[in-house]
Amino acid sequence: MLVEEAILGRRSVKVFDARPVPSELIERCLSLAIWAPNHKLTEPWRFTVLTGEARAELSRRIRQDLKSLDPAMSWAQLEASVLKHHRKVTSAPVIIAVYALEGDDPLRSRENYAATAAAIENLLLAAHSMKLGAIWRTGSLFEGTSVREFLHAPPHSQFVGAVYLGYSAQRDTPRRRTDARSQTYWVPVADDTQDS
Ligand SMILES: Cc1cc2nc3c(=O)[nH]c(=O)nc-3n(C[C@H](O)[C@H](O)[C@H](O)COP(=O)(O)O)c2cc1C
């Protein structure tokens, strides 16, 4: 698939069918993700792949984190929140949580975060080229202590996103973007032809 075709054809996919994704395809996506540019070759991305029953354990960890975050939360509120998260994390056959290692100073940390975001975009495009659907999601549920421990998130790392991956079961919806020209400033240059 041509790069242009992949970029224009990719859509965020939220609805997946139950078909499992072969692990070779997941590995292929990850092996393409890591070709993202990264300053000083820090290779700051760390991935955790969740499939099958691991997603149910994730829900249990989310419950623990919600409880310790707000011990005053009523039982009904907790159950409702856990159920909402459980539905989300089991909505896709595969979740890849992506963390960026912190650098030695704020600038390096920012660069590492940016490089990891670029790796996620690579991952999304790679998935699309393999006829897989995917969406990049954020949210505090991947930042809780218990969830981070379960996912082996490195101690000094920032959560950048979770890629939900699977075979799409949703209809293509049109996407909207503003013309890049309205978001671009071209610095004027002297016209050579007028100079002479
Ligand atoms: C940093 C980031 C975080 C996102 N978080 C969510 C999210 O939590 N939930 C969600 O439904 N979509 C999320 N998205 C996906 C965007 O909603 C989606 O990219 C946008 O609607 C444009 O659609 P497209 O990807 O099909 O072009 C996120 C995208 C990015 C880049």
Image (cartoon, rainbow, N blue to C red):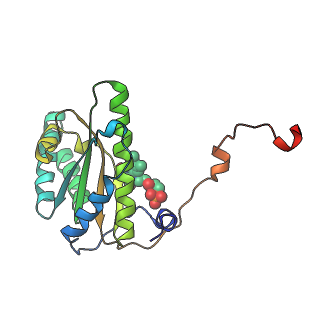
Q: Is residue 182 left or right of residue 193?
A: left
Image coords of residue 27 (percent x, y): 23, 62
| Residue drawn at (46%, 71%) of the image | 172
Q: Is residue 16 above or below residue 136?
A: below
Task: Inspect this view and state whether residue 99 appears.
Answer: yes
Residue 61 appears at what percent x and percent y? Answer: 12, 47
Nearer the observer, 144 or 107: 107
Q: Residue furthest front?
A: 196
User: Residue 20's quadrant in the figure?
Assistant: bottom left
Residue at the image position 53 percent from the left and 62 percent from the top:
175
Nearest the viewer among 8 and 148 is 8
Position of the N terminus, as image quadrant, is bottom left
Image vertical order of residue 35 relative to residue 75, above or below: below
Q: Is residue 14 left or right of residue 104?
A: right
Question: Would you say residue 70 is visible in this rendering?
Answer: no
Residue at (37%, 35%) from the top-left corner?
A: 111
Residue at position x 17%, y 50% in the image:
79
Q: How many numbered badges does the structure rendering display?
A: 0
Indicate whether 192 appears above or below 57: above
Q: Closer to the camera, 60 or 182?
A: 182
Point out the image quarter for the C terminus.
Answer: top right
Q: Position of residue 104 (x, y in %)?
A: 27, 25
x and y percent of residue 16 in the render? 30, 70
Q: Is residue 187 left or right of residue 95?
A: right
- Front in this rendered view, residue 179 or 57: 179
